[in-house]
Image (cartoon, helix red, strand yellow):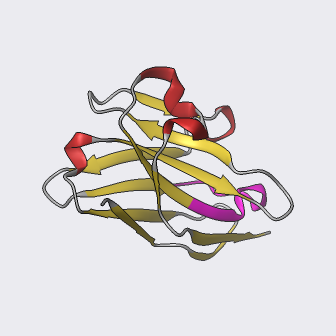
């Protein structure tokens, strides 16, 4: 059984930065593609970023150039670096693991395992 645990969320002013971590246990990180999604109050969970097992990167348009997804196989941890944060980035951020590849990684249905989420709040 794969378990994902996010950390690193918090309250930050607009223009600030955070780094979210997703610790993977039960299996090795290298065996999965990893994705980050977010859900704001009253809205559906939406795709943010993904990294495939081969290292291909996918980003939602509004975060391109501001967010960076990465993985550290030695630490079995995936990361999401959030820079130039905006109030509209406020949401609960979830990491997820997938056995799929390609552009389907931008869709929720590609993911089998999910973390519990970490809150990111950006004040104006």
Report the residue that reaches farthest toward the left. 74
Quadrant containing the N terminus in the rendered view: bottom left
Q: Position of residue 22 (x, y in %)?
A: 38, 62
Question: Is 1 in the magenta?
Answer: no
Name which residue lies at 59% across and 50% down.
Answer: 37
Question: Is 92 in the magenta?
Answer: yes
- Which residues lie in the magenta part? 82-93
Snapshot quadrant of residue 38: bottom right
Report the residue that reaches farthest toward the bottom. 11
Report the residue that reaches farthest toward the top. 102
- Above-or-below relation of 51 to 113: above
- Above-or-below relation of 63 to 73: above
Name which residue lies at 52% across and 69% down.
Answer: 116
Query: Left or right of 23: which side holds 90?
Result: right
Name which residue lies at 51% across and 22% down.
Answer: 103
Name which residue lies at 44% across and 21% down.
Answer: 102
Q: Position of residue 78 (x, y in %)?
A: 34, 54
- Above-or-below relation of 34 to 87: above
Out of 89 and 92, give the one closest to the viewer: 92
């Amino acid at each position: 059984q794969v378990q994902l645990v996010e950390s690193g969320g918090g309250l930050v002013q607009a223009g600030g930065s955070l780094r979210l971590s997703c610790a993977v246990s039960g299996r090795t990180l290298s065996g999965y593609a990893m994705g980050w999604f977010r859900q704001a109050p009253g809205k559906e969970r939406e795709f943010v970023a993904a990294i495939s097992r081969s290292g291909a990167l996918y980003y939602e348009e509004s975060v391109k150039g501001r967010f960076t997804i990465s993985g550290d196989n030695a630490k079995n941890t995936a990361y999401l670096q959030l820079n130039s944060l905006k109030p509209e980035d406020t949401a609960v951020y979830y990491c997820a693991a997938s056995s799929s590849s390609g552009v389907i990684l931008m869709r929720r249905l590609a993911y089998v395992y999910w973390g519990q989420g970490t809150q990111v709040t950006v004040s104006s």
